[in-house]
């Protein structure tokens, strides 16, 4: 088969490409250029640095495969970065990796792969695709510590038929062993951070530089609405956060809610973080949607343990102003046990054991 | 492989390496020494200088060897801007090579005034509007001989005339890096004071270029040091490169008529085969006023990245003329200046023919391009 291997210049995608080449497939390596500095220059930190592309190019050369850099900066800015900024401005905590996968890797890149005559795209994600009973299943990666199925929940049957994750059955240490054995220059390269375009600084600095109008300072309130402090920008806070509040209390205080309309950050005790459910918008299902009342496990953050839950669909009409409303759907998710720090904007991903059923974006928590 | 990216670089001509080879071995001397080995190197260097000067109608003292076109452009722009006391003015066209634009931007950061002359939708500057940008402080006007992306030929002679009418003291520079292989260039005919060339664009080695500096032109060196090149560019001479450059210039000038005829025929066949099948295809330069080797086209609805990769998979090397350091396609400032939207710019492809091109390769290239467009239109 001819396959398009997305190569970031890291060890995972290097090995993924190498394994496909070793299986005898015709591999074309590509690096996605997703982000650049204000003057169009390559970033020096984070992803898309010149040295990352250089690493990928050298690995491709070592594997004897052709290599190209594809420019998706416009699409990435519009579909991922602008949305990231807008989400924070709306008091949400976005997951840009999910959007990048949805908008760039498994949509535009997949199209590009087909246009280049490739049958599949290959990435270094730690997740498994299984074809069973006439359908494709998406499963957690064998290496539980590295499992990336959470950020892949948007893959449906069409996409899964055309992707391959060669590392899904491997542990990270095995990946590094393979890389070392093949003498790949990326074998010992450090793992990349989560939000690639933020670069050296944290996302708070990024928002100060890139959010139109900057960030808004405002009050810190307790649950009774009393002002207990001030903050420099509500986008610095995410639900469940304890650090950076700059206020002294007898017991630990956590961010319970961010209210962009009044630029307020609401704090409470650990018990106040607990919620019994959430609503999830714009869901996407690997195969078919669950039935009302189905029992699933739901993961509410990338690195959190799933919680058992019951799900119920609720149809909603969306569409503002003069535009014709479209039928979206939302789901009510009731946890078996209350969970802390459920942040709107994060993905809620549904599992049945190792299998990903689907997922969506958390809209609000239900107390 | 069908190599159609000759504007990026073109293979060395056979005679060139022959001329250079001795300077990679027995004639290794530093041209600044007093002994025999040095003397032989020095003589070869000066002979190369005379040859190069002669081929553009200049005198040998007016030739400054550089490391290539970029350095020549840097020396022209920065060297002129820095030659006066205090801030001065620079006028550049919006479609200049990055070496000129970035040098001008650097000067702007130092406090010099930079004015940018816009181009029409064909990428041409208007000499009168260039002249209008001249102010009392202006010391330099830089307009390229032909654009490296689209191949459009700029009215340099007319620019010189208009500039001189407005203010005779202004130095005029032209970047002739892309034009030399196919255009007759004579510095007195053009009337310019500074002219940049790069050897690898016409069959010489990489890493060598020159700046013609008309006698009496004020120029501050950019590379200071031992005072080589009459103080205008210090650094141990690249004798082998200079010899190669002179040999390549000789070959290129000798070969120009044949080049124009063969390459012109290849391009004619290429473009007519394409336009027969693709009525929407646009050629992004005035048909009667572009370098004979350039075919810069836009195919509406097709993203160039996809086509370029398909072409590479099928043995055709072409380009979009605008790549960043990582190798990604970027949107070209030249096309933006011509009024292209980003989307339109991403539909553009540059095919450039060269001295190794045979006329029948035009049809062959068109056939492969059409194959590679399958399913994309």
Image (cartoon, grey):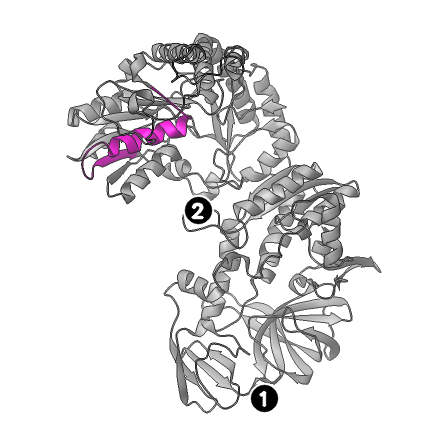
Q: Is residue B175 magenta?
A: no
Label 2 crowd bin: few (<14), some (14–19), many (20+), radius 10 Å: few
Q: Position of residue A296 (x, y in %)?
A: 74, 75
Residue at (34% x, 13% y) in the render: B53
Against B167, is A151 above or below? below
On residue A40, the disc is: 2
Image quadrant in which the N terminus of chain B is located: top right
How many labels sit on residues?
A: 2
Label 1 crowd bin: few (<14), some (14–19), many (20+), radius 10 Å: few
Q: Position of residue A338 (x, y in %)?
A: 65, 85
What segment carries the magenta color? B64-92
Q: Please tell me in which quadrant of the rendered image residue B174 appears.
A: top left
- Would residue A318 be visible to someone looking at this image? yes
Image quadrant in which the C terminus of chain B is located: top right
Task: Give the alpha-carbon distance from disc 1 to disc 2, as whole Å.
Answer: 47 Å
Q: Which residue is mark 1?
A: A271
For disc 2, the chain is: A
* Badge 1 or badge 2: first in the primary sequence: 2
Secondary structure found at label 1: helix
Q: Position of residue A274 (x, y in %)?
A: 60, 85
For disc 1, the chain is: A
């Amino acid at each position: 088969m001819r396959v398009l291997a997305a190569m970031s210049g890291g060890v995972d995608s290097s090995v993924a490409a190498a394994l496909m080449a070793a299986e005898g497939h015709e591999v074309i390596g590509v690096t996605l250029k997703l982000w650049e500095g204000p003057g169009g220059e390559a970033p020096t930190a984070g992803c898309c640095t010149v040295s990352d592309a250089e690493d990928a190019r050298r690995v491709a050369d070592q594997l004897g495969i052709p290599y190209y850099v594809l420019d998706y900066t416009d699409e990435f800015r519009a579909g991922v970065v602008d949305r990231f900024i807008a989400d924070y401005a709306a008091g949400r905590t976005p997951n840009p990796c999910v959007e990048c996968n949805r908008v760039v890797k498994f949509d535009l890149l997949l199209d590009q792969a087909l246009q280049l005559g490739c049958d599949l795209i290959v990435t270094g994600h730690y997740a498994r695709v299984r074809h069973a009973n006439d359908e494709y299943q998406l499963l957690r990666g064998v290496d539980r510590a590295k499992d990336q199925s959470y950020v892949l929940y948007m893959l449906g049957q069409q996409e899964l038929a055309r992707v391959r994750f060669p590392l899904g059955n491997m542990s990270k240490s095995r990946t590094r062993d393979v890389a070392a054995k093949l003498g790949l220059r990326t074998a010992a390269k450090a793992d990349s951070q989560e939000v690639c375009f933020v670069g050296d600084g944290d996302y708070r600095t990024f928002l100060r530089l890139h959010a139109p109008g900057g960030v808004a300072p405002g009050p810190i309130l307790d649950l009774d609405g009393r002002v207990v402090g001030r903050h420099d920008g509500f986008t610095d806070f995410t639900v469940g956060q304890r650090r950076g509040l700059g206020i002294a209390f007898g017991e630990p205080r956590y961010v319970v809610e961010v209210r962009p309309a009044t630029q307020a950050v609401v704090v409470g005790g650990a018990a106040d973080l607990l919620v019994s459910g959430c609503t999830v918008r714009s869901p996407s299902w690997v195969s078919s949607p669950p039935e009302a009342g189905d029992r699933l496990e739901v993961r509410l953050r990338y690195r959190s343990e799933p919680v058992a839950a019951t799900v119920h669909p609720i149809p909603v009409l969306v569409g503002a102003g003069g535009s014709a409303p479209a039928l979206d759907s939302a789901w009510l998710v009731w946890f078996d046990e209350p969970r802390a720090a459920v942040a709107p904007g994060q993905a809620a991903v549904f599992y049945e054991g190792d299998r990903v059923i689907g997922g969506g974006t958390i809209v609000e928590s239900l107390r | 492989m069908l190599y159609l990216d000759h504007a990026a670089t073109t293979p060395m001509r056979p005679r060139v390496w022959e001329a250079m080879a001795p300077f990679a071995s027995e004639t290794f001397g530093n041209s600044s020494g007093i002994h025999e080995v040095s003397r032989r190197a020095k003589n070869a260097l000066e002979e190369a200088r005379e040859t190069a000067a002669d081929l553009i109608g200049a005198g040998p003292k007016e030739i400054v060897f550089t490391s290539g076109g970029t350095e020549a452009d840097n020396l022209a722009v920065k060297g002129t801007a820095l030659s006066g006391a205090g801030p001065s003015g620079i006028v550049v066209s919006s479609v200049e090579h990055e070496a000129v634009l970035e040098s001008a931007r650097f000067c702007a950061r130092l406090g010099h005034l930079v004015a940018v002359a816009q181009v029409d939708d064909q990428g041409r500057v208007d000499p009168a509007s260039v002249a209008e940008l001249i102010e009392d402080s202006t010391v330099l006007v830089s307009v390229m001989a032909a654009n490296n992306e689209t191949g459009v030929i700029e009215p340099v002679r007319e620019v010189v005339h208009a500039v001189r009418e407005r203010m005779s003291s202004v130095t005029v520079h032209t970047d002739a890096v892309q034009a030399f292989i196919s255009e007759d260039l004579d510095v007195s005919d053009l009337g310019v004071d500074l002219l940049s060339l790069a050897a690898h664009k016409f069959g010489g080695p990489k890493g060598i270029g020159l700046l013609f500096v008309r006698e009496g032109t004020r120029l501050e060196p950019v590379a200071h040091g031992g005072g080589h090149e009459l103080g205008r560019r210090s650094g141990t001479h690249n004798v082998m490169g200079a010899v190669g450059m002179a040999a390549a210039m000789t070959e290129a000038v000798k070969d120009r008529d044949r080049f124009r005829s063969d390459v012109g025929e290849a391009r004619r066949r290429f473009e007519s085969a394409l336009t027969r099948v693709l009525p929407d295809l646009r050629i992004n330069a005035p048909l009667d006023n572009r370098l004979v080797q350039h075919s810069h086209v836009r195919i509406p609805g097709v993203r160039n990245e996809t086509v370029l990769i398909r072409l590479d998979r099928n043995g055709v090397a072409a380009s979009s003329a605008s790549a960043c350091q990582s190798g990604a396609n970027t949107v070209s400032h030249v096309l933006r200046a011509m009024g292209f939207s980003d989307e339109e710019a991403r539909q553009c492809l540059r095919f450039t023919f060269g001295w190794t091109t045979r006329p029948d390769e035009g049809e062959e290239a068109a056939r492969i391009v059409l194959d590679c467009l399958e399913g994309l239109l």
